[in-house]
Amino acid sequence: MTVAASPRIRTRCASSSSSRRNVPPLERSLGSMVTCTAKASVRVWTFSCVYLGTANFKVHIRTGGNSISPHHQAWENHLPDRHILPWDPTVPTAIPRNGGVPTVVHLHGSAHPPQADGSAFAWFTAGFRETGPAWTQATYRYPNVQPPGNLWYHDHALGLTRANLLAGLLGAYVIEKPEVDVPMDLPCDDDDLHLVIADRSFNVDGSLDMNSTGSAPSVHPQWQPEYFGEALTVNGKAWPFLAVHRRRYRFRILNASNARYFNVSLSNGMPFHVVGSDASYLAAPVTVSSLLISPAEIFDVVVDFSMSPTAEVEMLNSAPYPFPTGTAPGPLNGKVMKFVVAPNEPRDPPDNSTVPDREVPYANVASPGPTSETRYIAMYEYLTPSGQSTHLYINGLRLEDPVTEMPRSGTTELWHVINLTGDNHPLHIHLGMFQAVKMQQLLDLQAFTDCMTQVNDAVRCGVDRHAVGPVVPVPDHEKTWKNVVKVPPGFVTTVVVAFKLVDTNQPYPFDATAEPEYVYHCHVSATGFVHVSPINKYSDVVLCDAVQILDHEDNAMIRPLKLLP
């Protein structure tokens, strides 16, 4: 197997500053060909004609003290009239009357008003020839009032998310607060890198490959429950290597696959020091030998290569697909990338970074505490008589059915998420930040599932009598406010959901009760990066026709969420 050097995606030290002031809002569009080799090219879609692995792949937001740095983002669609990948009109899909590829962008993990959420119904085609029923504006305002952390942005168009992300419409977004970040002395500048991992398949001519026939073609001609690519890519390159020195590095690891989970470890046994997950730091770092990363999940880690006993280190993957009971990885999808450890040179600056003893006090919810509402959220999968998946629902309802989850803005709720399917599902709730506090196995699962399929009421089906199996502890490195929580099959996962700012315990400084509604869903597909400072508060994004489990989300595993005053 040949490998290619991976381009570095750097994050600046939090103490640095920009000289740009009062820059007017720009635009980002969708367009050009990215050349992979001298002999072949791969057509993909990108933001601002910037492909994964380049420095501009990231948007970086810096706030400080009492200052707030809102980010104004103008979105344009310059995609072609026809999609470059297959899609399935038999699942609920945005299908324009006059042609064109719909898109809309969601900033995953952000606290923002509903008009800037990227509703699946807020899609638009090239030149805004057509817009979806929830479309309101071309420029989104992201307040950036939340704690510092790692976010990402990606396409969210109705029924097309899996195909649009596979085509390349994703990016990373970082929020920094120097008063929080700087005292930690974490690695920065050249030693702070994003690793965006995704699986992809390619045709013999180098073009992206996606199935053209579904698993149950008599029901859905093209849709299949999960997409699994044959090649593992990091920052857009298949099986790359990265040259590192014997010093600490900070890696912000994002799983941008449609459906594949990764259980990553280092071949020489070196640990990961986890300092954060998704859009929040931990209360204190946690040292682990491996990381299970669901689609759309981010882990912020430090690896100390000064302790490496070898000159080469491979990042390995051991997660079955589909997770957790599928096929074990083979020689190709069992290897992610390689680190080549070079000796330090006399001119190299000293490594003054650390792994701090403590981080943020608001991270961990030791107990649920007072909550305004308790909800039961059930995940279903529907099968053909031969056992092929046809669609997946939450609480037995479709996206277009009337809203049933209506929390009050500024409150905290307790959700008991019941997984009646055979897969682990990454739960994503728009706007709210949340964390799992308990995972308990369901006993006599088939009887409970049969009752739920008929009655669709956890209380009437005696969930308390069934949720008495072993309790699986929530991993210490996931005990913080997250944007994705893994929900194992056959378990009730109890989740604390905060519809407010978790670092200050204050309500949102915007009207979260306006239209359109937010949503929550399974995130089995969606990556790029945005970095904006208080004095450089505008950036531009262009969608370019260049050369998450989103598969579940696209086929109805998504529900509306309406906040009340």
Image (cartoon, helix red, strand yellow):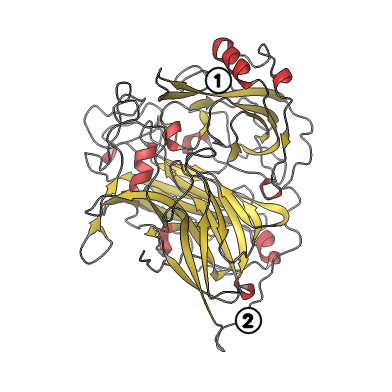
The reply, left or right, for residue 468 in relation to residue 554 is right
Please say whether residue 377 is visible from this viewpoint: yes
Expressed as whole percent of the image width and height from the top left, the position of residue 533 reads 53, 60
Query: Which image quadrant: the N terminus?
Result: bottom left
Please say whether residue 543 is visible from this viewpoint: no
Mark carried by residue 395: 1
Expressed as whole percent of the image width and height from the top left, the position of residue 244 reads 52, 73
Query: Which image quadrant: the C terminus?
Result: top right
The reply, left or right, for residue 330 in relation to residue 506 is left
Q: Which residue is mark 2?
A: 350
Dividing the picture into quadrants, the one containing residue 49 is bottom left
The reply, left or right, for residue 495 in relation to residue 110 is right
Instruction: Between residue 248 and residue 114, name the one nearer to us.
Output: 248
Q: State yes or no: discs 2 and 1 in contact (Cβ < 8 Å).
A: no
Asked if 336 appears above or below 373 in the picture, the reply is below
Amino acid type at circle 2 is Pro
Looking at the rendered structure, the secondary structure element under dot 2 is: loop
Asked if 236 appears above or below 18 in the picture, the reply is above
Mark carried by residue 406: none
Looking at the rendered structure, the secondary structure element under dot 1 is: loop
Instruction: Between residue 417 and residue 137, name the one nearer to us.
Output: 417
Q: Residue at x 29, y 48 (%)?
A: 208
Measure the alpha-carbon separation of dots 2 and 1: 55 Å
Expressed as whole percent of the image width and height from the top left, the position of residue 536 reads 49, 60
Of the image marks 2 and 1, the number of the one nearer the N terminus: 2
The mark total stands at 2
Q: Residue at x 55, y 46 (%)?
A: 297
What crowding class fits label 2: few (fewer than 14 Cα within 10 Å), some (14-19), or many (20 or more)? few
Instruction: Between residue 105 and residue 377, name the one nearer to us.
Output: 377
